[in-house]
Every structure is written in structure tokens, then in C-alpha cells.
Image (cartoon, rainbow, N blue to C red):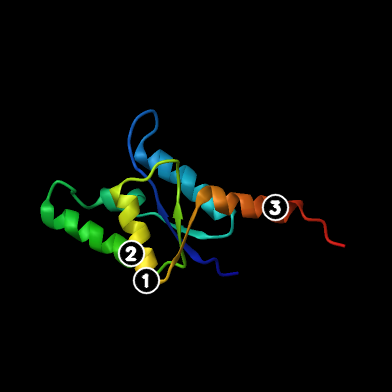
């Protein structure tokens, strides 16, 4: 069965957990709801150097291309920053549905609680 691509965006910040840890948790939840998670922050930093302006721009371009190929944009976490707002604006311009992880999880749990007649 094909699973639709879901682009994962969030306010990525270090702290108690690394960005990769945070992104992995979000991707797992999205996967469990039936999507194929697309999360550039998990792999782009492995080969791009954000401190080099040309590579920073290439990373943005690659992430935008992945968003274009996605079926849905899923906003994770409780915060929204400029990067998340930009992802939402791009999705809106491209006609890609944007929702929250909480929204996807709520819909999934409601479907599990329904009893067939």
C-alpha cells in the first residue's frame, strides 16, 4: 500500500533533546498515522554546511522541492516561527493541505474508537 508523503515542519531547537531526536519522534508518529514522513532536518545537516551561504540556500531549495512533492504539510509542536510560517505559506500557494500533528492524531484515534454496525 502506498502511503502519501507528509512533510514535517516544526520549530527546531536543541535543548533537552537534539533536533534529530525531536524530528525522529515526530516522524514516527506521522508514520504510525499512515503517512511517509519527509523531514529534511533529519538528513540535510549530514552533508550540507549551513554556515556556508550557498549550501544554506541549497538546503532551503531542496526542502522546498520535497514540500512540493508532498501531499500534506504537518506542523508539529506547540510553537510557530518564521520558518514554519514560510512552510505553511508555500504549502498554501501550492494547494497542499496543512494540518497539525495533534489534528492528525485526533482523527486517527476517533477512527479507532468507531464500532462498525
Q: Which image quadrant: the N terminus?
A: bottom right
Between 20 and 113, which is closer to the camera in this rendering? 113
Local crowd size for mark 2, using a 10 Å CA cut-off: few (<14), some (14–19), many (≥20): some
Q: Position of residue 35 (x, y in %)?
A: 53, 60
Q: Position of residue 20 (x, y in %)?
A: 37, 42
Left or right position of 84 against 61: right
Local crowd size for mark 1, using a 10 Å CA cut-off: few (<14), some (14–19), many (≥20): few
Q: Looking at the image, is 71 positioned above or below residue 41?
A: below
Q: Disc 2 vs disc 1: Cβ atoms closer than 8 Å?
A: yes
Of all residues shown, which one is farthest toward the top?
A: 16
Q: Position of residue 59 (x, y in %)?
A: 23, 57
Label 2, label 1: how far apart the Cα atoms are = 6 Å
Q: Disc 3 vs disc 2: Cβ atoms closer than 8 Å?
A: no
| Quarter where residue 16 is shown | top left
SS type, badge 2: helix
Local crowd size for mark 3, using a 10 Å CA cut-off: few (<14), some (14–19), many (≥20): few
Q: Which image quadrant: the C terminus?
A: bottom right
SS type, badge 1: helix
Label 3, label 2: how far apart the Cα atoms are = 29 Å
| Quarter where residue 95 is shown | bottom left
Mark 2 highlights which residue?
90
Tell me, for residue 64, which label it has, or none.
Answer: none
SS type, badge 3: helix
Q: Looking at the image, is 90 positioned above or below residue 53?
A: below
Residue at position x 56%, y 52% in the image = 103
Mark 1 highlights which residue?
94
Left or right position of 66 against 31: left
Mark 3 highlights which residue?
110
Residue at position x 59%, y 55% in the image = 33
Amino acid at each position: 500500500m502506498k502511503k502519501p508523503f507528509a512533510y514535517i515542519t516544526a520549530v527546531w531547537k536543541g535543548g533537552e533533546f537534539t533536533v534529530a531526536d525531536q524530528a525522529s519522534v515526530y516522524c514516527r508518529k506521522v508514520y504510525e498515522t499512515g503517512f511517509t514522513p519527509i523531514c529534511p532536518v533529519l538528513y540535510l545537516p549530514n552533508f550540507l554546511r549551513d554556515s556556508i551561504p550557498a549550501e544554506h540556500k541549497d538546503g532551503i531549495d531542496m526542502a522546498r522541492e520535497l514540500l512540493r512533492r508532498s501531499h500534506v504539510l504537518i506542523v508539529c509542536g506547540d510553537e510557530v516561527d518564521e520558518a514554519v510560517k514560510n512552510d505553511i505559506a508555500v504549502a498554501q500557494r501550492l494547494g497542499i493541505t496543512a494540518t497539525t500533528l495533534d489534528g492528525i492524531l485526533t482523527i486517527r484515534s476517533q477512527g479507532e474508537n468507531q464500532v462498525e454496525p
